[in-house]
Image (cartoon, grey):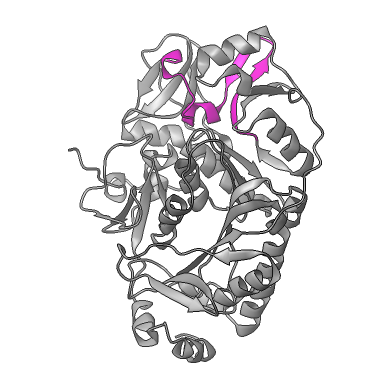
């Protein structure tokens, strides 16, 4: 079932229980989600907690996320449990206080980015980057659904960050890899080869080299892969230590049974192996930069391009809780920025930005059209819009972008909600209600008659 060369190699890795690992890889993948506590205060019924994540839960079976309105509203994210260990790393290497600049370099589809956005808080800045256009669009969608206002999405090759000397406090490089940790999926097995693993190792070195200058002195780089291959894991970390001024940091794991500490020529990493932990395969190591970075060439501006006019300021004040000083206008669109004005100008000069913070609205000749990003954002002033609570069937119709029956609301904009959580905007124009759910996000699959069987049941306590 598995490549012979892979089996030979894991048998040579002393810290790997090869027999136990191969047996565990034959079992189904555990199903896990991470909750967005800013939107949902309930837990999944009959679930188990992920030990290293405060909002992580294992489910008994895999639901249909597509058929669950709460998924589309950003109440939870389906995420592999091992990757949620990022929470423990972040809490141990950072206080999380103040204006913290964080980069998730290889961010799509968004599991670790949405996690980081929750960890860094409203005062921090997260740059979630993905080089591939289609994946960057998915990343931006998932960031929007999550609803935190502290994230900018960019689409750049890692080399684009090399001029941002010392800009970031923390960088996560969840590097593309040979995927051995995902060998429960036959596609991952089929795509594996020693040549591909070697290619991945060289690509990882290039990625690390490109992004390293943008980490400040004493800044933290979190390096992770979903493979067991030493050539992509501890050997690459050792290569970084030899090449640059850096050291690995110890992470306390004694409270979490099954995580394997890996020591290799003076560096440390941590392995997650199916059979020892309930999750997929993962390697993670934490590096602290001990050397200096260069200085950034900044073109200083007092304000970003596109200051708001009086009417813009009034609508921002009426519809949002965003401070006026964090909002900008770009052409006919108004945004709230998570970055300082100076930082945003710097990022705009050096990077291709896909999602500029939170888009609040678009200015039209006859008024303002609120944006879907605002509906899902923590920054919306909910009392500014009437809410129409939808039952499950109407919620699915809304997500399909079908016609919605008129509700008992006054003319104008209102939010469609499900279980009290915003799903998006509608506009009551009198004789009908216009559905403003994004066209590209609409549900396209056929809907089974017994849809309730396929979604998560929540504890009512």
The quadrant holding residue 247 is bottom right
User: Would you place residue 302 above or below residue 270 in this image?
Assistant: above
Tell me, yes or no, whether the highlighted magenta stretch contains residue 332: no
Pinpoint residue 395: horizontal percent, then vertical percent.
38, 33
- Extreme left residue here? 461
Indicate the position of residue 114 as horizontal and vertical percent values. 49, 45
Is 451 left or right of 73, judged from the image as shown? left
Residue at x-position 38% and y-position 34%: 38
Left or right: 220, with 447 as reference point? right
- 296 w.r.t. 230: above or below: above
Q: Residue at x 66, y 73 (%)?
A: 242
Q: Quadrant of the N terminus?
A: bottom left
Residue 359 among those drawn in magenta? yes
Q: Position of residue 459 (x, y in %)?
A: 21, 42
Comparing 241 with 17, the one in front is 241
Number of labels in the image equals 0
Q: Which residues are magenta?
A: 356-385
Work out whether residue 182 can be spotted: no
Residue at left 43%, top 25%?
Answer: 404
Q: Is residue 145 visible?
A: yes
Q: Is residue 426 above or below residue 50?
A: above
Left or right? Give the position of 72 relative to 318. left
- Measuring from the top left, give residue 108's x and y in whole percent: 57, 53
Is the C terminus in the top left, top right, bottom left or bottom right quadrant? top left
């Amino acid at each position: 079932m598995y490549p012979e060369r892979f089996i030979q190699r894991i048998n040579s890795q002393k810290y790997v229980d090869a027999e136990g690992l191969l047996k565990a890889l034959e079992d189904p993948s555990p199903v896990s989600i991470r909750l967005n506590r800013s939107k949902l205060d309930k837990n999944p019924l009959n679930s188990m907690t992920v030990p290293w994540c405060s909002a992580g839960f294992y489910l008994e079976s895999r639901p249909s996320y597509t058929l669950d309105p709460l998924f589309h509203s950003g109440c939870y994210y389906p995420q592999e449990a091992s990757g949620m260990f990022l929470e423990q790393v972040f809490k141990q290497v950072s206080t999380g206080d103040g204006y913290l600049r964080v980069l998730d370099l290889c961010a799509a589809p968004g599991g670790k980015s949405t996690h980081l956005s929750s960890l860094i808080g409203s005062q921090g800045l997260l740059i979630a980057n993905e080089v591939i256009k289609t994946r960057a669009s998915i990343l931006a969608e998932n960031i929007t659904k999550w609803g935190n206002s502290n994230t900018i999405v960019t689409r750049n090759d890692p080399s684009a960050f090399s001029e941002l000397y010392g800009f970031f406090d923390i960088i996560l490089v969840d590097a593309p890899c040979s995927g051995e940790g995902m060998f429960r999926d036959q596609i991952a097995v089929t795509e594996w080869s020693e040549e591909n693993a070697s290619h991945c190792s060289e690509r990882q070195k290039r990625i690390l080299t490109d992004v390293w200058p943008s980490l400040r002195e004493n800044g933290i780089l979190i390096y992770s892969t979903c493979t067991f291959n030493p050539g992509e894991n501890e050997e690459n970390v050792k290569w970084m230590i030899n090449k640059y001024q850096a050291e690995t940091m110890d992470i306390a794991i004694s409270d979490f049974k099954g995580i394997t500490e890996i020591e290799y020529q003076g560096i440390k990493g941590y392995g997650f192996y199916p059979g020892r932990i309930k999750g997929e395969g993962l390697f993670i190591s934490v590096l602290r930069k001990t050397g200096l970075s260069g200085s950034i060439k900044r073109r200083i501006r007092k304000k970003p391009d596109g200051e708001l006019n009086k009417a813009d300021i009034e609508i921002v004040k009426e519809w949002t809780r965003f401070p006026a000083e964090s909002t900008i206008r770009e052409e006919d669109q108004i945004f709230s920025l998570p970055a300082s004005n100076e930082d945003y100008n710097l990022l705009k000069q050096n990077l291709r930005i896909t999602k500029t913070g939170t888009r609040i609205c678009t200015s039209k000749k006859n008024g303002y059209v609120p944006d879907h990003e605002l509906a899902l954002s923590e920054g919306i002033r909910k009392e500014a819009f009437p809410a129409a609570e939808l039952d499950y069937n109407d919620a699915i119709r809304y997500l399909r972008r079908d016609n919605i029956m008129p509700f008992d609301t006054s003319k104008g904009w209102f939010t469609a909600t499900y279980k009290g959580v915003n799903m998006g905007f509608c506009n009551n124009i009198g004789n009908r209600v216009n559905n403003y759910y994004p066209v590209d996000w609409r549900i396209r699959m056929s809907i089974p008659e017994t849809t309730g069987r396929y979604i998560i049941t929540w504890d009512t306590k």
